[in-house]
Amino acid sequence: MIASFSELHRQGVAHSIEVWNQSGELAGGMYGLAIGQCFFGESMFSLETNASKVLMVHLAHQLQEWDYRIMDCQVESRHLLTMGARTISRSEFLSILRACVDRKPNQRDWKIRWQWSGPEA
């Protein structure tokens, strides 16, 4: 897995998104695959309260700005539903994939920074 994702990262497909607190410590993060106009979230973690929520909200807005059509969260959870995720049928999912995996997003650089002041944010 590590070798595969490292190679996908070198190819510009696999991405790690981190949330750092003001003290410079890792607060949370996720990794996933960007293929065409689709982002497939693979795994997420949170070391501080609300860090993954902050990450998801900012990432969703950034992906929308870059013209991505879907962020696949894979598994429905209460946590994701509170942030606007919704379950779609398999046929709708496949239709989105057929339409979007070969289209290029309007994306410039994955190396962006967001400020986060902590759990109370």
Image: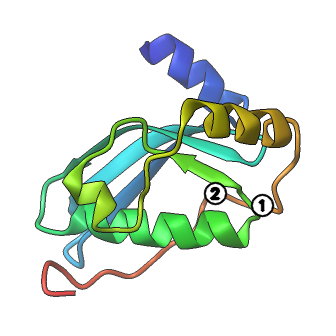
In front: 57, or 25?
A: 57
Residue designated by label 2: 110
Who is closer to the viewer here, 113 or 52?
52
Residue 65 in which image quadrant = bottom right
Residue 116 at what x, y percent from top left? Answer: 31, 80
Q: Residue at x 50, y 72 (%)?
A: 113
* Picture quarter with the N terminus: top left
Mark 2, residues whose alpha carbon is within 10 Å: few (<14), some, or many (≥20)?
A: few
Image quadrant occupied by the C terminus: bottom left
- Residue 11 drawn at (x, y percent): 73, 29
Q: Is residue 63 left or right of residue 120?
A: right
Q: Are marks 2 and 1 in contact (CB under 8 Å)?
A: yes
Question: Which numbered circle lies on residue 11?
Answer: none
Residue plotted at (32% across, 71% down): 54
Instruction: Please say if 24 is above or below 94.
Output: below
Which amino acid, by three-letter code, is at mark 2? Answer: Trp
> Image quarter for residue 64?
bottom right
Name the residue type under label 1.
Gln
Furthest residue toward right: 103
Horizontal relation, residue 50 to residue 83: left or right: left
Query: At which x and y percent is residue 27?
Result: 21, 61
- Give percent across and percent down for residue 112: 58, 68
Describe the element under mark 1 as helix, strand or loop: loop
45 left or right of 119?
right
- CA gap between label 2 and label 1 equals 8 Å
Left or right of residue 79, residue 1 in this image? right
Q: Which residue is mark 1?
A: 107
